[in-house]
């Protein structure tokens, strides 16, 4: 008797959870293109703060993949580099060629002015097309408060 009651209670809980999760599951099953069509342009800010070409390539891959999934015109992507990650944006960076391709695809590459000062770098030390903001972390925080999606690859 107790087993039958426990089975009924479990079945009711699963059914209730299934009904409660139905809208979430339906939304999760929509394609990225459908999600982009339902809202305005998707905005993504990626953080790069490590001196590691693997992470740099991962951030560049993330930007490219999001643009391919949602359509380049449906997404705005920024990659913000600060701290040791600023080496990614230097002219002699191991990913310099990929930086140009990202810029050509409307990915905005942003350097932290605070880090540049501490590293004694000027805009001339960076690859072409890099934007400089006063403080990279504050820029990311501002973007988040504006509703941007944030990813740290």
Image: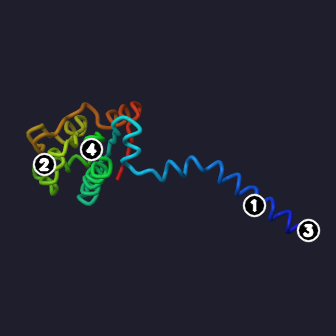
Residue 58 sits above or below residue 111 on the image: below
Residue annotated with mark 1? 11
Residue at 24% from the left image edge and 38% from the top image edge: 112
Numbered disc 1: secondary structure: helix
Report x, y in % for residue 43. Answer: 34, 39
- In this view, the mark in front (3 or 2): 3
In the structure shown, which secondary structural element does the residue marked by tag 2 occupy?
Answer: helix
Label 4 to label 3: alpha-carbon separation: 61 Å
- Is the residue under label 3 in contact with that under label 4 (CB below 8 Å)? no
Mark 2 vs 4, N-terminal side = 4
Q: CA distance from mark 1 to mark 2?
A: 56 Å
Q: Quarter of the image containing the N terminus?
A: bottom right
Q: Residues within 10 Å of mark 1 (few under 14, many from 20)?
A: few
Eye-nearest disc, 1 or 2: 1
User: Can you give x and y, in whole percent of width and height, for residue 136 in the image?
Assistant: 29, 37
Q: What is the distance, in whole Å, between disc 3 and disc 2 at their CAs?
A: 70 Å
Q: Which tag, 1 or 4, sits closer to the chain's start?
A: 1
State the separation of the CA atoms marked 3 and 1: 15 Å
For disc 4, the marked residue is 79
On screen, residue 134 versus residue 42, left or right, reads left
- 19 displayed left or right of 106: right
Write the residue at 25% across / 41% down. Answer: 73
Residue drawn at the location 50% of the way across and 48% of the way down:
27
Q: Residue furthest left?
A: 124
- In the rendered view, tell whether residue 145 sits above or below residue 30: above
Q: Earlier in the sequence, mark 1 or mark 2?
A: 1
**Residue 52 x, y percent position in the rendering:** 26, 57
**Image marks 3 and 1: residues in contact by CB distance under 8 Å:** no
In the rendered image, which residue does mark 2 sit on? 100
Residue beneath disc 3: 1
**Element type at mark 4:** strand
Q: Residue at x 20, y 34 (%)?
A: 132
């Amino acid at each position: 008797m107790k087993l039958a009651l426990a089975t009924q209670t479990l079945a009711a809980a699963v059914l209730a959870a299934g009904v409660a999760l139905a809208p979430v599951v339906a939304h999760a099953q929509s394609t990225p293109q459908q999600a982009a069509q339902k809202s305005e342009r998707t905005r993504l800010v990626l953080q790069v703060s490590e001196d590691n070409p693997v992470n740099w390539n991962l951030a560049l891959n993330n930007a490219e993949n999001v643009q391919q999934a949602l359509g380049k015109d449906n997404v705005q992507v920024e990659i913000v580099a600060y701290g040791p990650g600023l080496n990614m944006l230097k002219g002699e960076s191991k990913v310099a060629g990929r930086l140009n391709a990202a810029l050509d695809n409307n990915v905005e590459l942003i350097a932290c002015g605070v880090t540049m000062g501490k590293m004694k770098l000027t805009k001339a030390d960076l690859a072409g097309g890099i934007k400089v903001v006063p403080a990279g972390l504050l820029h990311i925080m501002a973007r988040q408060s504006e509703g941007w999606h944030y990813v740290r690859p």
